[in-house]
Image (cartoon, rainbow, N blue to C red):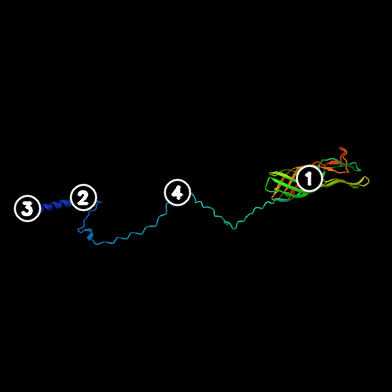
Amino acid sequence: MSWNSHRRAGWVVAWAVGAIAMTATAQAQPGATPVIEPAVAPEALPATPPSPSPPPSPPRPAARQAHDRDEPTRVAPRPLATATPDASPVLTPRPHRSVAFLMRFGVEFGGDKIGEVMSTEGDSRSIEAGGLVSFSGGVFIHPDAPWTIEATLGYKSDTASYKNGDFSFIRIPIDLIGSYRTGNLRIGAGVTVHLAPQVSCNLDGLCNFQINLDNAVGAIVQLAYGVPRGNAGYEFGARFTSITYTGDQIVNEQTGKNELDGSCLGLFVGGWL
């Protein structure tokens, strides 16, 4: 056998050994895939179109938590009706009226005794210069301020009436009072003028005369408590009046002077609107 024959036999044996080794390696690694190199460069291979990709699957909803299944979803209550700004009524505050009409009724006691009358039944009734009842009306100014002013014109009388006549003392007061107000309480002072004071006695068989006194000027100190009701209201209070009546036809038995002390203390109730 020549050298060439020996060399070919050696290549055959080497190739067989290599084939056996490759087979054994492939059996030992069942997951391995043999790589076959193409004989032609990749550039020379015909281009194959890419396989179309599958369309994206729609997103799956997020998995709900366990508490979502256990607790119901809270939904805000839906209003039955929705009020629009145009539909809602507009409430306009009532403007404050600072000037009102004032009415008042009072009862007062005090002053010098003018006279005393006794009935046939034995009942006696005295007339005092400071008594007794009064009615008045006028203007009440009460702005949004800590002060008020009241000006009233009234009628004041102390009268004893009987079947055969009456005995009376009548005058017409004009009062002007300014007050300091704190809350509903008013503390005031002012002046009063009593016009046409007159003492009259008309009792059959006893007296028949009429005495006109001079107009008198006095002072008033007043304490009032008012309860407002919007632009109206009511009040009650107390007042002290200091005044003296004079006249040529009267004589004070105690002092001997031609004067009568009409000072008095009284209570009153009233209201304004």
- Crowding near the residue tagged with mark 2, few <14, some 14–19, many ≥20 C-alpha atoms within 10 Å: few
- Mark toward the start of the polypeptide (4 vs 3): 3
Contact between labelled residues 2 and 3, with CB atoms less than 8 Å apart: no
Give the Cα distance between marks 1 and 2: 138 Å
In this orientation, which residue lies closer to the viewer: 131 or 248?
A: 248
- Crowding near the residue tagged with mark 3, few <14, some 14–19, many ≥20 C-alpha atoms within 10 Å: few
Q: Position of residue 39 (x, y in %)?
A: 19, 58
Give the Cα distance between marks 1 and 3: 166 Å
- Mark toward the start of the polypeptide (1 vs 3): 3
Most extreme residue toward the right is: 205
Give residue 172's mark: none
**Which mark is nearer the camera, 1 or 4?**
1
**Which mark is nearer the camera, 1 or 2?**
1
Q: Position of residue 238 (x, y in %)?
A: 76, 42
Give residue 3's mark: 3
Give the Cα distance between marks 3 and 2: 33 Å
Task: Inspect the image, locate mark 1, and give the three-letter code of the amino acid beneath it.
Answer: Thr
- Crowding near the residue tagged with mark 1, few <14, some 14–19, many ≥20 C-alpha atoms within 10 Å: many
Task: Inspect the image, locate mark 2, and give the three-letter code of the amino acid beneath it.
Answer: Thr
Contact between labelled residues 2 and 1, with CB atoms less than 8 Å apart: no
Task: Write down the residue under mark 1.
Answer: 192
- Mark toward the start of the polypeptide (2 vs 4): 2
Task: Write down the residue under mark 4.
Answer: 66
Task: Write down the residue under mark 2.
Answer: 25
The residue drawn where x is 19% and y is 51% is 22
Give the Cα distance between marks 4 and 3: 85 Å
- Mark toward the start of the polypeptide (1 vs 4): 4
Tell me if residue 161 can be seen.
no
The residue drawn where x is 23% and y is 59% is 43
**Which mark is nearer the camera, 3 or 2?**
3
Task: Inspect the image, locate mark 4, and give the three-letter code of the amino acid beneath it.
Answer: Ala
